[in-house]
Amino acid sequence: MNAPVHLLDPAQPRHDWTLDQVEALFETPFTELLFQAAAVHRAWFDPTQVQMSQLLSVKTGGCAENCGYCSQSASFKTGLKASKLMDPDVVIAQAARAKESGASRFCMGAAWREMKDRDLPALARMIGGVKSLGLETCATLGMLTKDQAQQLKDAGLDYYNHNLDTGPDYYASVVTTRTYQDRLDTLEHVRDAGMSTCCGGIVGMGEARRDRAGLLHALSTLPAHPDSLPINGLVPVSGTPLGDRITAEGTQIDALEFVRTIAVARLVCPKAMVRLSAGREQMSRELQALCFLAGANSIFVGDTLLTTPNPEMSSDAALFADLGLTPMPVGAGPAAQ
Ligand code: SAM
Ligand code: DTB
Ligand code: SF4
């Protein structure tokens, strides 16, 4: 009998990873892990290209969920001012500026537990307007029904972001107003509507390595791997349960463990755009360079994420120049093999 294809070629995507195997990847000697991840990265992508997405919070604060990391939950006093859904024309104007600054994808985020049908007309105008600028469109609006996913697809939405955030065993320590299965259900609706998925998580929330492995195991065993896989470093927000705990304890996650998480994400989802997401503001240039070596090939650009700071465009431009990195063109993806 022939050997399974993945034993011959570690760059081939697999959906049969076990949790123990994913955890074993984390335990690989650091330089060996990076070497393997860098090789898999090169099998599918030009390693000098980095996809650039820009975020905009189109509806801020007042959210009914209690995600322990989030500045926007109505359950915590973070001092954030809640606002209504933005005017589509204002959003489209901001997207045009993002395109001028080099972003290829524009991601609209709303602090909602779930999308409401009454907001569909405004959302459809926003999405259509952003798409007509020649940008890839992405939205993150909370839970979706099957019909809503289809309506967003019909409006021109390319990507839907919906994170699993952490491993299944740690999930209830972070949020209690929804379940892991709720997240998986929305992801299924997004896939069924034919949209690309953007799904990843956060590290540095006090989880164990086994939980980080659990997150990447969950992602790598989905019926389809995420097209984009954001790895966020927790941005501690004062007033949130996690922000206050982290601030009191000092450090969040060891930098090398963060790089390991990026490398394992690259290995278990070889064709995904692995995004070095939130947390870059707190990272050194050297740490970011290691993340790119470990297989990260996407970032958020612009000086604000949703509600928290991100590096200035000018410092990212200097970093790209020093590392010899260039923006990935709109629509580029993994190579056909
Ligand atoms: N309400 C929608 C939802 O939760 O899916 C969309 C917006 S929500 C802010 C998008 C993602 O941002 C979360 O799933 C989480 O992974 C990430 N995020 C939120 N606050 C963060 C923080 N303080 N640090 C790092 N990542 C964060
Ligand atoms: C993702 O994984 N990270 C982005 C995006 N998807 C929506 C959001 C990061 C938010 C960081 C905290 C804030 O700015 O509020
Ligand atoms: Fe709401 Fe999303 Fe923040 Fe959770 S992460 S509180 S769902 S905005």
Image (spheres, helix red, strand yellow):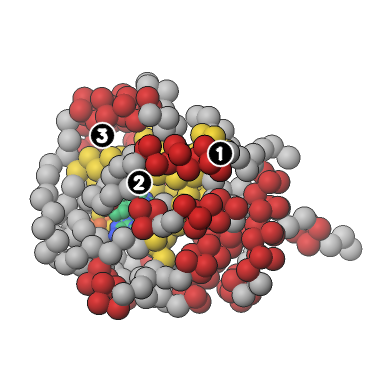
Foreground residue, 252 or 65? 252
Q: Residue at x 45, y 45 (%)?
A: 299
Mark 1, residue position: 325
Q: Position of residue 104 (x, y in %)?
A: 44, 32
Foreground residue, 182 or 75? 75
- Looking at mark 3, is its residue's CB closer than 8 Å to ligand 1? no
The mark nearer the N terminus, 1 or 3, is 3
Under tag 3, what secondary structure?
helix
The mark nearer the N terminus, 2 or 1, is 2
User: Which one is in front in this view, the residue at disc 2 or the one at disc 3?
Assistant: 2
Under tag 2, what secondary structure?
loop
Distance of label 2 from label 1 (alpha carbons): 16 Å
Where on the picture, by quarter, is residue 206? bottom left
Mark 2, residue position: 311
Q: Is residue 133 above or below residue 177?
A: above
In the image, taking residue 82 as reference, residue 1 lies left or right, namely right
- Amino acid tagged 1: Leu
In the image, taking residue 23 as reference, residue 170 lies left or right, namely left
